[in-house]
Amino acid sequence: MKSTLLLLCAICLAGTISAQEKSNTPKSKYKSGSSIVTVWENEKDGKYGPYKELSFKVERVYKKDEEWISTINFTLEQLMELKAAIDKAVLEEGVEVKD
């Protein structure tokens, strides 16, 4: 639970999308209630050759009047929905969380 909350905080703090990510299509999306985790996969050149890096965008979407709005603010209940979406993304994307 503690590692999941730390991962959640890290993802929320890193909630910006780079210019490269904006031009690509997301690898996958995970939804629980109004919370969405979008997974981006980017090709990188590293010290030992090319590799793929995953980045995650978290958001809550809701409709106000006729417009869909995205936010990174969550109530406690919505945080639990976000946690469920993050858990699914971490499990299905094969992310290893180190304690």
Image (cartoon, rainbow, N blue to C red):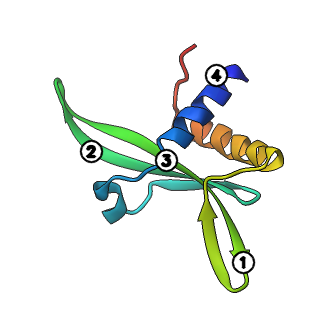
N-term-proximal mark, 4 vs 1: 4
| Residue at figure coordinates x 43%, y 43% from the top left | 55
Q: Amino acid at mark 1?
A: Lys
Which residue is identified by label 3? 15
Residue 30, placed above or below residue 47: below
Q: Amino acid at mark 2?
A: Glu
Total numbered circles:
4
N-term-proximal mark, 3 vs 4: 4
Percent of width and height locating residue 59: 60, 55
N-term-proximal mark, 2 vs 4: 4
Q: Amino acid at mark 3?
A: Gly
Which residue is identified by label 1? 64
N-term-proximal mark, 2 vs 1: 2
In the rendered image, the quadrant that contains the C terminus is top right
Secondary-structure class at tag 3: loop
| Residue at figure coordinates x 24%, y 40% from the top left | 44
Q: Would residue 37 be found to the left or right of residue 43 on screen?
A: right
N-term-proximal mark, 3 vs 1: 3
Instruction: Give the foreground label among 4 and 1.
Output: 1
Percent of width and height locating residue 13: 51, 39
Q: Check contact, mark 4 vs mark 1: CB within 8 A.
A: no
